[in-house]
Amino acid sequence: MALKKTDLYSSIWQSCDELRGGMDASQYKDYILTLLFVKYVTDKAKSDPDSLIDVPDGGSFDDLVALKGKAEIGEGIDKAIAKLAQANELHGVIDVASFNDPEKLGTGKEMQDRLSKLVAIFADLDFRGSRAEGDDLLGDAYEYLMRHFATESGKSKGQFYTPAEVSRVMAKIVGIDEQTKQDDSVYDPTCGSGSLLVKAAAEAPRGITVYGQEKDNATWALSRMNMILHGDATADIAKGDTITSPKFVAGNKLKTFDFVVANPPFSQKSWSNGLEEDYGRFEYGMPPPKNGDYAFLLHALKSLKSTGKGVIVMPHGVLFRGNAEADIRRELLKRGFIKGVIGLPANLFYGTTIPACLVVLDKEGATNERSVFVVDASKGFVKDGNKNRLRSQDIHKIVDVFNKQTDVERYSKLVSYGAIEGNDFNLNIARYIDSSEPDDIQDLHAHVHGGIPNRDIDALRLFWDAFPSLRETLVAPNRDGYSDLTVDIADVQRTVLDSDEFHDFQATVRTKVDEWFAAHRDALAGITADTEPNGLIAQLGDDLLARFQDMPPLDPYDVYEQLLAYWHETIHDDVFLVMTSGWVEAAKPRPAIQDKDRKVTESPDLVVGSGRATKKYKMDLVPPELIAARYFADDLATLDDLNVAAEAAVQAVEEYIEEHAVEGGSLEYAGDDSVTKASVKARLKVSDDEAPDPDEIAALEHVIKLFDAESAAKKAVKDARTALDLATFRRYDTLTKDEVWSLVLDDKIYGTIVGRIASASAGLTQLLVSRLELLGERYASTISELDDEVADLERVVMSHLTLMGLSQ
């Protein structure tokens, strides 16, 4: 049975529930990720005889499965993991957590049941086909778990993980790319769980040599496992404090690397405790004893080769704080080591809510020009739970703008050394980029004399560039510097939507999407088990972005986001299903997931049968509404007509009752609170025993007919729905690959992308309409006209008071 990636991740996350109560998230991640590791290396050894990890007898995940339900399961798991660790020199890596700890896992039957359930969850996963190329089941599962653990670990314990979105930005701007050689090196001096190193290495398709150091023992173990899980078992991850005990040294000098990426702890107060040797790191100044930000930055700089490049996450304070830090910053800027600064949104990171920045270092590019490229990306994000997150469009825009050094108004700017020197080497981003939106200024002259300020009309230039003649249609000169709307405010929207230019614009948008999809449909249809999803979406996204360059008022990154958002929501899962099961098999219905009590735990897409024979199904790849729309259009139309008839029947009952079930009405006694068919029949029996009122009898009999018509109409809808659902369900059995392609590629993917981009385009047009309506209303009446209107109202009030004899 093919499951979506997201369903598999959810199953893994459910395993965490089995551990809750005995420990916090920062501890139970060690158990979950260790089991994930053992399961992976076991499956990998079965499918790859040349696997770098040796799985000995008694040290495989199969041995853990054999322990399910046994009283000694905790002790048995520890022994099996110990054998695996010993066979691969992984002592202290995969055997950090004890599965026989009664304080964390309970005693007796409690531990036995808890660990048996845990093992069972992982036993259902199959990693034999996992390639660990950054977009396979395993890599994504590890990423999913690390993100969730970081979210739940709290402020003081969530620093082991750098958000994937930030890691991608750092990896793409540091200079690692397809030209990077396998013997080039990347180093993270504070690597945490290794997530940043993984993303950096993923940018080098030919491979890159990986080095890292981590202080915390448990987190170091996570990093070692992470490297192996992502196919880099030879990565050199050292253990120890990077500042006081750097492990990558040669004599009294630090080992140097081609690239350095880092997300060190912010403003660490105890950074210098135990510091004996500085290895020449502080030649440009000694960081303050109670703040270690520049200690890590200078360590990163010293760890770079003469041609090296680096990027490090820092709090904004490093850009403008004074005293010792100001002296260090001045020396670095004078030498041209700081290539750029990128301001990020607040609340991105798990260890802190404060905004951070990326400081980009470049020894090779340290020229006499010494300019700094500054980016304010603080406004581009989406709220995601209790954290903020960079969207795909935010990542792409940051990378494009920085790598191309493009000046973008209120977003990015190349700042000269002279300007920085003139600001006393203060790099506070706000000094160089004003990212705030322009104030909406009220024009007093316009309020007094009428007209809309041309300044406000000109501010809509992106729309006038797209619809040049529409400006002449909508506004006309009033006097120097001011204009008037030429249509009523209520007609602005219709004028825009009916314009030829707007229709041409919409048609051009549709044509661009059509041409883009036609260029990539074969690639989508050609998805197989060997497809690389990351490469596929990069190809699709970059081409869509390129096609919408220079098409105001559409922002090409907004168009790009329509595709990428849908990719993450749906297409990625679809690709995974096809890769694992093939097109036809992946399109087949599957039973909705049930819990141990056989209760359905996910909303079914289709329900077939009734009573005890009812079966509930999920259709992940091909939703049933697509089948119905393509193959049963007439039945859908009939169902729509029946629904309309049913709604009319319901309304007929409601209207008749509302009219007659009132005091003195013919249905007054049909029901105390509400009129129902039962209460009407009961009233008819009473009427037979009393002197019958012909009007009441007629009304009661009529309302029964209305109730019967309502029931018949609802039954017709239900019968038609049942028949359509059954026909739809049976149609899945006969789907060919070509039909699945049409349903998924043309109806689902293309149809959704077209709709989303069209909505984004229409939404932008609505901004133009709303702004013109606001300006029209704001300056519709001059102050003198308002004064005259007030005076007229005062005269009316006085005349009424006079008629009432209240005037004086």
Image: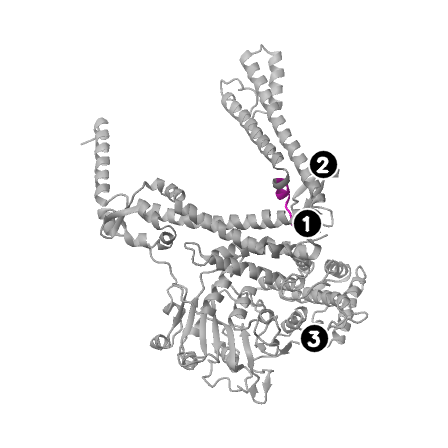
Camera-side residue of 249 and 596 = 249
Say which mark, if any, is on residue 610.
2
User: Could you tell me residue 472's position as x and y percent?
Assistant: 31, 47
What's the residue type where badge 3 is placed?
Gly
CA gap, disc 3 and disc 1: 50 Å
Mark 1 Cα shell of 10 Å, populated few (<14), some (14-19), many (≥20)? some
Identify the mark nearer the N-term, 3 or 2.
3
Looking at the rendering, in which quadrant would you find the C terminus?
top left
Say which mark, if any, is on residue 288.
none
CA gap, disc 3 and disc 2: 56 Å
- Counting labels gives 3
Camera-side residue of 391 and 650 = 391
Camera-side residue of 470 and 65 = 470
The residue where tag 1 is placed is: 737
Left or right of 540? Residue 126 is right
Which residue is drawn at the image coordinates 54% and 19% (left, top)?
Answer: 667
Q: Are marks 3 and 2 in contact (CB under 8 Å)?
A: no
